[in-house]
């Protein structure tokens, strides 16, 4: 029976703790980092603790750049952006990019190092994608940085925008206007393709879509109209992840982090009860 047909079964382990690694430890180490140092930085403190799954960002907290040479249309390898002269803005972002550059030059893929170290110590490895985020622009919002991308810069029409964010409190409006609007097919395709490339490239145990990193996915007042579009995206991700798991011979888990109640989720255009009812997700992480 295909793994996609076993959705009601035990697709993932029962986890005591899933450890969410916000961005990467490479932010805090001066390059270069050896494979041993990368493994220690991310997993060295797990021994003797009830952590059963590591959930890590894909090279950055933004949703346009990743920590490996990517083939996804609209996505960029952080190192490529740095070498093309993209604004860095924050020295910590340079550390990440330079660590990656030197690692790949030495034949080291840092994400593969993490996957293998997780296996060695018996911890499941999950990737996490922030479905929207504010780390791709400076605090003023006037300047993109190394974690941004040409997809963001070249398509202002994909943003929720000043008018689209109007209606939210002022402090939320300041960030939401720079988030991308999931009403656009291209925006949804980028996130889907990033997720599937990550699961295909690395032997992961699961993938998490983080809808609470920086909530906001549609123009104000258009969330209900966008709900079916978001459900279709989640369904496409589920089908793609199952296809990769089938080819690999073992299931890949799929999780979502969402508001801590159904009404709050639907307010953002997230039809979580349908996702659960239709078996589209394995783990639901209610959050606030």
Image (tube, helix red, strand yellow):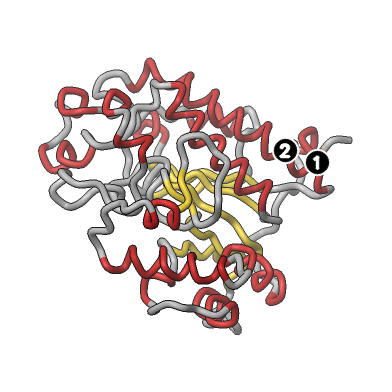
Q: How many marks?
A: 2
Which disc number belongs to residue 246? 1
Q: Are marks 1 and 2 in contact (CB under 8 Å)?
A: yes
Distance from Cα at disc 1 to Cα at disc 2: 6 Å
The x, y position of residue 11, in whole percent, is 73, 48
Q: Residue at point 36% right, 38% down?
A: 150
Q: Nearer the viewer, residue 270 or 197?
A: 197
Q: Which quadrant of the figure has residue 275? A: top right
Answer above or below: position of 197 versus 113.
above
Q: In screen coordinates, is 282 left or right of 286?
A: right
In the rendered view, would you say 41 is above or below 11?
A: below
Q: Closest to the observer: 264 or 150?
A: 150
| Numbered mark located on residue 283 in the image | none
Q: Residue 256's spot in the image, x, y percent?
A: 51, 43
Q: Which mark is residue 242?
A: 2
Residue at position x 62%, y 61% in the image: 125
In the image, farthest residue toward the right: 1
Residue plotted at (28% across, 23% down): 157
Label 1, secondary structure: give it: helix
Instruction: Say left or right for 206 vs 187.
Output: right
Label 2 element class: helix
Q: Is residue 34 above or below residue 190?
A: below
- Residue 101 is situated, as x and y percent measured from the top left of the image, at 48, 65
Estimate how packed mark 2 is, as few (under 14), some (14 to 19) or many (20 or more) residues with alpha carbons within 10 Å: many
Q: Nearer the viewer, residue 255 or 236?
A: 236
Mark 1 surroundings: few (<14), some (14-19) or many (≥20) residues within 10 A: some
Check the image and name the residue furthest to the front: 84
Q: Residue at x 32, y 26 (%)?
A: 158
């Amino acid at each position: 029976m295909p793994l996609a047909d076993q959705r009601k079964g035990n697709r993932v382990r029962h986890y005591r703790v899933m450890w969410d690694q916000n961005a990467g430890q490479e932010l805090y180490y001066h390059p270069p980092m050896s494979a041993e140092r990368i493994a220690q930085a991310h997993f060295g403190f797990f021994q003797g603790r009830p952590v059963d799954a590591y959930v890590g960002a894909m090279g950055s907290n933004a949703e346009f750049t990743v920590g490996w040479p990517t083939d996804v249309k609209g996505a960029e390898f952080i190192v490529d952006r740095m070498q093309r002269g993209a604004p860095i803005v924050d020295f910590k972002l340079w550390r990440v990019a330079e660590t990656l550059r030197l690692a790949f030059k030495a034949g080291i893929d840092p994400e593969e190092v993490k996957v293998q170290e997780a296996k060695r110590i018996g911890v499941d490895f999950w990737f996490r994608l922030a479905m929207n985020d504010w780390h791709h622009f400076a605090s003023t919002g006037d300047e993109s940085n190394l974690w941004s991308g040409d997809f963001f810069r070249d398509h202002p029409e994909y943003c929720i925008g000043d008018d689209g964010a109007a209606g939210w409190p002022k402090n939320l409006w300041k960030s939401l206007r720079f988030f991308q609007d999931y009403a656009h097919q291209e925006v949804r395709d980028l996130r889907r393709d990033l997720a599937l490339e990550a699961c295909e490239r690395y032997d992961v145990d699961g993938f998490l879509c983080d809808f609470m990193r920086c909530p906001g996915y549609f123009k104000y007042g258009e969330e209900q109209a966008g709900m079916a579009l978001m459900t279709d995206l989640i369904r496409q991700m589920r089908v793609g992840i199952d296809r990769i798991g089938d080819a690999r011979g073992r299931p890949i888990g799929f999780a979502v982090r969402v508001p801590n109640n159904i009404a709050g989720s639907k307010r953002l255009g997230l039809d979580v009860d349908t996702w659960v009812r239709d078996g589209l997700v394995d783990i639901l992480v209610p959050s606030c």
